[in-house]
Amino acid sequence: MPTRFEVNGKPVEVDVEPRMTLADCLRNVLRLTGTHLGCEHGVCGACTVLLDGEAVRSCLMLAVQAEGRDVTTVEGLSNDEDLTPLQKSFRKHHALQCGFCTPGMITTAHALLTEEPDCDADRVREVLSGNICRCTGYISIVEAVLEARSAYRKGEGEPR
Amino acid sequence: MKLPAFEYECPATLAEAITLLAAHDGDAKAIAGGQSLVPMMAFRVASPSLLVDLRRLPGLDEIKIGDAGVRLGAMVRWRDILDDARLARAHPLLVAAVKHVAHYQIRNRGTVGGSIAHADPAAEMPGIVVACDAEIAVTGKAGARVIAANDFFLSALTTALAPDEIITEIRFPAWPAGRRFGFEEFALRRGDFAIAAAAVFYDVDAGGRAANAHVGVIGVGERPARLPTVETVLNGARVDAEVIARAAAATSAAVAPQDDIHASAAYRRSLVGTMVERALTAAAH
């Protein structure tokens, strides 16, 4: 089924079976393998992408449902020149070890900080409760997200 | 796991959607946010031959607040409820319950109609509509009808919705100012399904006594339910510590949960009493 949407600001057209999830379409058709698939049933959060700016689980959405929408993946939250403030903060705080959950953490944190740049640690923990990390114990991730708040407040360093 | 194969249609009108569902004789499923249906398909618990996507249907995503109460279009998302500042006054119990629904990402896609159609016995929304005596407006091949929430849920994952019917609206009776309420839930992780939860409210008469008490419980049976024996304890009483303790004991006596992988029946029975105790304590203060 032909389906058109935007990915990271660029229009794409794909021809997919209805049963293909957005996550599989991003990875296997569009070759954007930054989006990771952990559980494939909406529990782990690794596949989080932004749909018109809102964080969603791309394993719980069909690619055909993305018609006309604007999808941002973790690739769209980086640039070739430098690490973004959120990336720098993750590096500084050692907010990743194996890195498998990191794309979901980055996309989720970006959506949160864009909407709520003044969120407190409790709010960060609540939002990240939908993203499973088996390495870090979360403390370093929460610290990284909290430190990145300032970049979103000033409106500078928007990582796109 | 990857989803089983299916056909897909995305009609522009409710009438077309109903025609498509009716033509497949129970083998088609409506999909809204897909936050329950897609995992069911990933587990191959559900394998419909056709998915009818409701996303283009007009007018199903509105929150209407009036003298008769709150009306939620079936495609209203959890996020829309939490973003609507009017609901803090128009239906604070609904808002309190929705704060427990799933995780951040799921709240951006999941819908109230989808949750009710799915009818998970541990989900908040079915519990709230039963506790509040809400009505479910549906439309099918035979026309529109309104189903009382208590008649809608038949058993776990089983509702009174016919295969060709689509939920269009959920109607909550008006919420008077000054109503006392509480919502308490225990889950293993924030955002997970409830092991047990309680939704309570009552009005206070001129003499300071409870009237019109509603006590709803979630996660302790095949479907959410109100508990009349507990409401009897509250009606006409001043809700103090002694009454709350009796209500909690009556709650544990009134439910018959099953053992499952998450908790024993005895634990759930005890826990739901504690949830009612906490919800009433919050309501009374």
Image (cartoon, coloured by chain):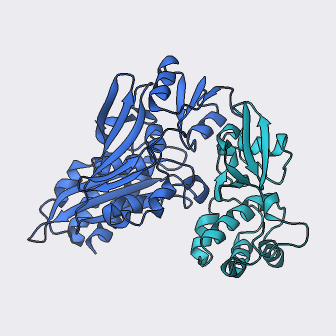
Chain colours: A cyan, B blue
Question: Residue B89: x and y, percent?
Answer: 32, 66
- Identify whether B241 is placed above or below B135: below
Residue at 75% across, 61% down: A134
Instruction: Report the side of B59 relative to A13 (left or right).
Output: left
In the image, taking residue A128 as reference, residue B18 lies left or right, namely: left
Q: Residue at x 35, y 61 (%)?
A: B93
Quadrant including the N terminus of chain A: top right
The residue closer to the viewer here, A52 or A96, is A52
The answer, for residue A135, to whether it is visible in the render is: yes
Image coordinates for residue B67, horizontal then vertical, percent: 23, 56
For the point 44% across and 25% down, which residue is it?
A: B164
Residue A3 position in % (x across, y down): 72, 37
Q: Quadrant of residue A113?
A: bottom right
Quarter-of-image position of residue B209: bottom left
* Extreme-right residue of the structure: A81
Pick the residue in front: A71 or B209: A71
Q: Quadrant of the C terminus of chain A?
A: bottom right
Viewed as shown, does residue B255 lie left or right of A123?
Answer: left
